[in-house]
Amino acid sequence: MSKVESASRTLAAVLIPMILAVGGYVANGLLEKQRDAVETQKLDQEMLNRAIEVMFFAKEKEHLFGNELSLESRRLYRAHWITTYNYYAQVKLTDDFVAIVMEQETDAVDKRIITADDKPARTSDQAADGWVAVGQPRSRQHADLNFEIPQNAITGDGRIRPDTIIRARWSVNLRKNTLNTEAHGGLNEIIGLIPAGACAKVVKSEANIRSQTWALIDIVPCQDPIAAVPSPSSPKFSAGRPENRVTEAAAKQTPKG
């Protein structure tokens, strides 16, 4: 019995420190995870508070609408904060509310309203009516797309198949080309304004132009409803947290003219 007791004591002397060490390691790991969770919750709340400030309590319109020169860049700014708010908030902004926000600061008074029945005559070198910023076709966030697009019309690289019919979610500038919309001097002249609900046929498209897909379009009468890219009930449907959008005026703070 004395040999058994001696062996037991020896084994206990070896195992107890090992068990304590393993237990301490596990406990430290749990504490570290708890600290990380608390820190993440704090950061999430800070981001939500910032989004709430921008969306609902901004004292200057630049806080909500952005201070870039072009409507296209200002909408990227708005879409970022709408997505940020919807990601962190329990009560999401509806698509109807998003449309109201995106329609602000359109400056329609000084622009020609262009429809299928009333659009400028083309010159001999024009292949279509003009170019529009479509948005980000592969995104599931409602604010990221200026048009309703059929689900099967979007290619893997973010372009839109030719002859696709798209419908404007809100008013969209029709432009001469895809050049920088922030530059002075008429590099990319605005032809007019396509109203919300108007339809267009895509002639061709280019992806990744200043964070958006652009399309050369013919404005056409609307016919059948469009089976558009769905907007999820919760923005967390799409993977990852909201990312900062790179606008054409990201490096400068030029007031709108």
Image (spheres, helix red, strand yellow):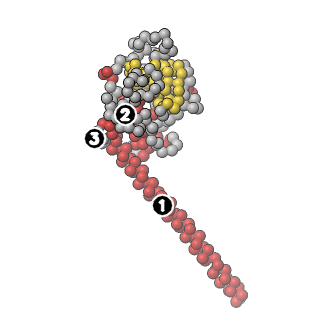
- The residue most toward the left is 59
Helix, strand or loop for disc 2? loop
Q: Amino acid at mark 2?
A: Glu
Residue 183 higher or lower than 91, as above or below: above
Image check: 93 left or right of 231? left
Find residue 133 and name its label. none
State the residue in front, 91 or 77: 77
Q: Residues within 10 Å of mark 2 (few under 14, many from 20)?
A: many
Mark 1 vs 3, N-terminal side: 1
Image check: 137 left or right of 81? right
Q: Residues within 10 Å of mark 1 (few under 14, many from 20)?
A: few
User: How many numbered marks, from 0 up?
Assistant: 3
Residue 122 higher or lower than 17, as above or below: above
Which residue carries the number 3 mark? Answer: 59
**Where is residue 182 drawn, in percent x and y?**
40, 30
Quadrant of the image containing the N terminus: bottom right
Q: Tell me how far mark 1 sits from mark 3, CA to CA.
A: 37 Å
Q: Residues within 10 Å of mark 3 (few under 14, many from 20)?
A: few
Q: Tell me how far mark 2 sits from mark 3, CA to CA.
A: 17 Å
Do the residues bearing badges 2 and 3 touch, measured as CB atoms within 8 Å?
Answer: no
Q: Tell me how far mark 1 sits from mark 2, CA to CA.
A: 41 Å
- The residue most toward the bottom is 2
Identify which residue is drawn at 57% across, 32% down.
157
**Where is residue 2 drawn, in percent x and y?**
70, 89
Identify which residue is drawn at 47% across, 57% down.
37
Which residue carries the number 1 mark? Answer: 34
Mark 2 vs 3, N-terminal side: 3
Quarter where residue 198 is shown: top left
Between circles 2 and 3, the one closer to the viewer is 2
Between circles 1 and 2, the one closer to the viewer is 2
State the residue in front, 224 or 105: 105
Quadrant of the image containing the C terminus: top left
